[in-house]
Amino acid sequence: VLIAVLTAIVAIGAVVGALWYDARQDAAAADLHRQATQLHLDRPADNLAKAEDNLKQAIALYRRVVEEHPRSRSAQLALFQLGNALVQINDVKGGVEAYSKYVPTYGTNQMMLGLVHQRLAYAHLLAGDREAAVKAFLNVVALSGTLNKDHVLFELGKLEESLSRPEGALAHYQDLVKVFPNSPFAGEATVRMKALEAKKTPAAGAPASTPGAAPVVR
């Protein structure tokens, strides 16, 4: 009985200790995240050197949250903000790595995951990799519970147009207008659909050409 009681006390102590440790980690991570976010947002527009220095300090603090406190409640948002800050400082490769790390690490948050894939697509576009951007945008379309799907469908349509794939662009615009008729992007998508369909249809009244017909000489 004494052994059982001692074992129970040790187990309870271990649980309490783990909870106390996690609480300390959460508090430390939250403090670092607060400092990083303040530096990230407080970038004077009239002092570019100071703004860049603040951004670099924010990046360093975001990294500390992610690396030193990965299990904390602040780590998930810090990793997303780290990607944003790296892209802002023109470290596009670092931004892609941060966003890509988010997906397997915190992929259960569907709503947040949609934003991460969208930012990842923009980073790929900045790097000149349009096909990778298409894949990232399509990952958002495949998710459920995201709030940015209408925006992503519109971006996919524009991207397909830039890749000279009008059929793909038309399909994305049609999905946008059908599924999200009240979206602020639906109006422009409709205009772009009409323009694409007009290119497919020969102009009214245009004479049909006859293969092999000899030109008329007057």
Image (spheres, helix red, strand yellow):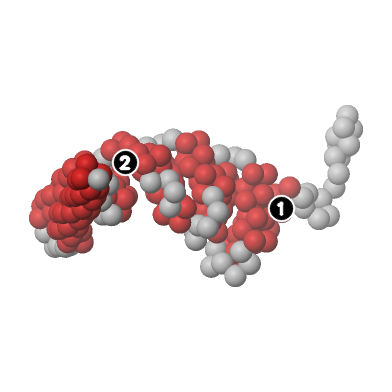
Q: State how far apart marks 2 and 1 are (Cα).
A: 40 Å
The quadrant in which the N terminus is found is top left
Bin the neighbour count of mark 1 within 10 Å (Cα to Cα): few under 14, some 14-19, many 20 and up: few
Residue drawn at (54%, 44%) of the image: 138
Residue 107: tell me if it is visible: yes
Query: Could you tell whether 201 is left or right of 19 in the image?
Result: right
Query: Tag 1: residue type?
Result: Glu
In this view, the residue in front, 93 or 90, is: 93
The first of marks 2 and 1 along the sequence is: 2
In this view, the residue in front, 80 or 128, is: 80
- Which image quadrant for residue 46? bottom left
Residue drawn at (20%, 45%) of the image: 2
The quadrant in which the C terminus is found is top right
Residue drawn at (67%, 56%) of the image: 174
Residue 101 x, y percent position in the rendering: 35, 39
Residue 200 x, y percent position in the rendering: 73, 47
Q: Which mark is residue 30?
A: none
**Nearest-to-viewer mark from 2 and 1:** 2
In this view, the residue in front, 59 or 183, is: 59
Residue 214: tell me if it is visible: no
> What residue did someone put label 1 on?
197
What secondary structure is marked by label 1? helix
Residue 24 x, y percent position in the rendering: 16, 54
User: Number of numbered discs present?
Assistant: 2
Query: Tag 2: residue type?
Result: Ala
Query: Could you tell whether 108 is left or right of 208 in the image?
Result: left
Seen in the picture, residue 38 relative to 9 is either above or below; the reply is: below
Query: Could you tell whether 37 is left or right of 87 in the image?
Result: left
Extreme top residue here?
A: 212
> What residue did someone put label 2 on?
98
Residue drawn at (51%, 39%) of the image: 135
Query: Could you tell whether 158 is left or right of 98 in the image?
Result: right
